[in-house]
Each structure stands twice: as C-alpha cells, then as structure tokens.
Image (cartoon, rainbow, N blue to C red):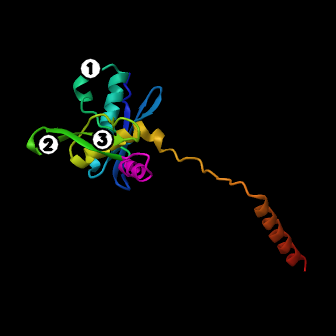
Amino acid sequence: MARKLIEVQIKVWEASMGFEAQGTVRLKDGYHRTPVYWSKTRKKHAEQGAAHGLFKYLSRTFDLNVEASEQKAPVPVSADARARLNEMVQRKILTGFGYEELGKSGADHEILFQMKAWADVPGQPRLVGPSVTARSKKESQARAASLLYESISHLDKAPEPVTIIRPLSTEAIQKKMQRLRESMEQVQV
C-alpha cells in the first residue's frame, strides 16, 4: 500500500509595497491556509514566513516537538499599518505613535532587530504593542506597527455624520416662506 504525501503549496506574489506569500496544505480533512506574510524588500522573506506558518500548523496537527522554531515565528504584516496609524494621528484619534528599539542580536551578517511600537491615545496611558524581531529595522517597524494597529483598530472607526439642526426664528421661517411663494409665482407665469 502506497502512502500518500501531503500536498504543500506556497504562493508568492508582488504586492503594492513589497511581496506577499501564503501557504496551503491539503490534508484528509481539507485545506489549511496560513495568514498572508509580507516583506517589503525580499520575496524570500515572505516565502519563508508562509513556510514557517505551514510548519507551525503541521507541528501542532501532528503533535511534533518544535519549541525552538516557534521562538522565531514570522508575524503576518499589514502593508499599510504605518500609514493607518499616521492617519489616526492626523485625525487626532492618536496624539502620536512611534517605535522603541529594544536591541540587536545575532552575528554581523545576520543582525536581528527587536522593536516595539507605541501609541498615545488622548486621556489614556501610552499603549505599547508586543515585541517583534526582524532582519531589518524597517521590517521590524512594519511588523510592530501592524500588531499595534490590530490592537487599536477599533478606535479607527469613522464617526457617523452628524447633521446640526438649528431652530429657526418665526421671522426667518416667514422670510423663507415668502421666497418660496415668489419662486412658485415665477414658475406659474
């Protein structure tokens, strides 16, 4: 009896601000897709993120012991989280946001940057997102911003439009009625 191999597929595509990748695995009970992983500069990094997502899923599914690999799990990133946070500052939902560099580690040719993003919300203590690690400062900022935005996106809801109705005086109503009558008389002529 031949054993059927697991079907694994990783799709990588060019996105508006970098590269995105998603992994798919087919098992007996159906398909499983990873979140979309993003890298601003390298196609390979997005692909590795998707591969790691599949590996993590399969490890949990088949109860494998992979504690060491789970420590460096890539974070799915929204390409425009920094832009959305900036928009929230412009709309005065936030009074500011930024990044805190927690340190660098690794060999000179494989430096890893550890970063947290923070946001100031009026009337509340500073909100600090979780720590992330990435191979470049930009990528760590993008990941940190993405996780921070996920945690505060509920603040980014556009308010319902408000119509302000001012009560009119009797005199103002009479003037409007007079103008309406005059315009109707001109139409009838």
- Image coordinates of residue 105 in percent, x first then y, are 14, 37
- Relative to 105, 56 lies left or right: right
**Total residue callouts:** 3
Q: Quadrant of the N terminus?
A: top left
- Whichever of labels 3 and 2 marks the residue nearer the N terminus, that label is 2
Q: Position of residue 7 (x, y in %)?
A: 38, 34
Residue denoted by label 2: 110
Residue nearer the viewer, 134 or 98: 98
From where the camera sits, is residue 10 visible? Answer: no
> In the structure shown, which secondary structural element does the residue marked by tag 2 occupy?
helix
Which structural element holds mark 3?
strand
95 on left or right of 29: left
- Element under label 1? loop
- Asked if residue 70 lies left or right of residue 162, the reply is left
Residue type (three-letter) at the residue carrying disc 2 = Glu
Measured in 3D between alpha carbons, the distance from the residue under mark 1 to the one under mark 2, in whole angstroms, is: 26 Å
Q: Are marks 3 and 1 in contact (CB under 8 Å)?
A: no
Please give the name of the residue rendered at 64% of the width and 52% of the height, measured from the top-left corner.
Answer: 163
What's the CA distance linking mark 3 and mark 2?
Answer: 22 Å
Residue at mark 3? 117
Q: Is tag 1's residue or tag 2's residue first in the polypeptide sequence?
A: 1
Which span is picked out in magenta? 79-95
Q: Position of residue 23 (x, y in %)?
A: 37, 39
Q: Is residue 90 magenta?
A: yes
Q: Are marks 3 and 2 in contact (CB under 8 Å)?
A: no
Name the residue that disc number 1 marks.
65
Q: Which residue is rendered at x = 90% and y = 76% of the image?
A: 188
